[in-house]
Amino acid sequence: MLNTMIDNNSSDVNSNNNNNNGTNATITIAGGGSEETSDVWRIFEFVSQILNCVYVPIIVCMGSLGNILSVFVFSKTKLCKLSSSYYLAALAISDTCFLFGLFIQWLNFFDINIYNRDYFCQFFTFFSYLASFCSSWFVVAFTVERFIAVMYPLKRQTMCTVRRAKIVLSGISVLGVLHCIPFWISSQPVFLDERQTTICDIKNEYKAIVEDLLTMIPLY
């Protein structure tokens, strides 16, 4: 009888030990998986930082050089007599302005925090959004102008003129300024406690409004 009780107790102890070992193994496996995931994310962040440090200046330099040459060709040659040249020249200028704003943000990688300073934050946020707005609508205007020239060739001489192109480009620029003024008002340098750094961001009281205007999706 005593031997039977001892054997039963021994079996219970062994089964408990086996269960504990299985639990520990599961925890070890889970912990190892999380460590592997964190290592992958560290590698991913490291590679992304390297790529940002390399490809951004290449894009800025090559893009700006190409845009400057385009403006020279469209404004200093016989092409300046064509209305389409004004759209393409304006597009090149707006793209160059956007690349300049991107370059200012890229300087943050080297702790040159021009973009995150007061007034610079507001200006470059406004400047970048304006350049992006104008680039998009310059493409639309150029597409409409080419559509008219191809589909209605008889009206090309009266509708696709240099004067009309200047009016359209000026109107888009004015609308762009009016559209982007809220970004100037709503932007400011914000200090992040968790990262102990200052970034240029939208004021908290304006974030919902700006996101609604950009996405046209109500936030609840």
Image (spheres, rainbow, N blue to C red):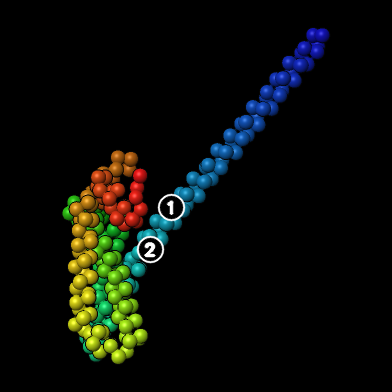
As drawn, is 44 to the left or to the right of 208? right
Q: Please state which amino acid type lies under the numbered disc 1.
A: Glu
Please provide percent x and percent y for residue 81: 22, 88
**Which of the 4 image quarters holds residue 53?**
bottom left
**Secondary element type, mark 2:** helix
Q: Quadrant of the N terminus?
A: top right
Please provide percent x and percent y for residue 19: 67, 27
Q: Please state which amino acid type lies under the numbered disc 2.
A: Val
Name the residue that disc number 1 marks.
45
Name the residue that disc number 2 marks.
54
As drawn, is 167 to the left or to the right of 36? left
Q: Nearer the viewer, residue 91 or 172?
A: 172
Residue name at image x 23 percent, y 56 percent = 183
- The mark tally for this picture is 2
Please provide percent x and percent y for residue 217: 35, 53
Any part of residue 114 in sight? no
Q: Quadrant of the C terminus?
A: top left
The answer to whether residue 119 is above or below residue 163 is: above
Q: Residues within 10 Å of mark 1 (few under 14, many from 20)?
A: few
**Which of the 4 image quarters holds residue 21?**
top right
Residue name at image x 58 percent, y 34 percent = 27
Between discs 2 and 1, the one toward the N terminus: 1
**Which of the 4 image quarters holds residue 9?**
top right
Q: Nearer the viewer, residue 58 or 127?
A: 127
Residue name at image x 56 percent, y 42 percent = 33
Q: Are marks 2 and 1 in contact (CB under 8 Å)?
A: no
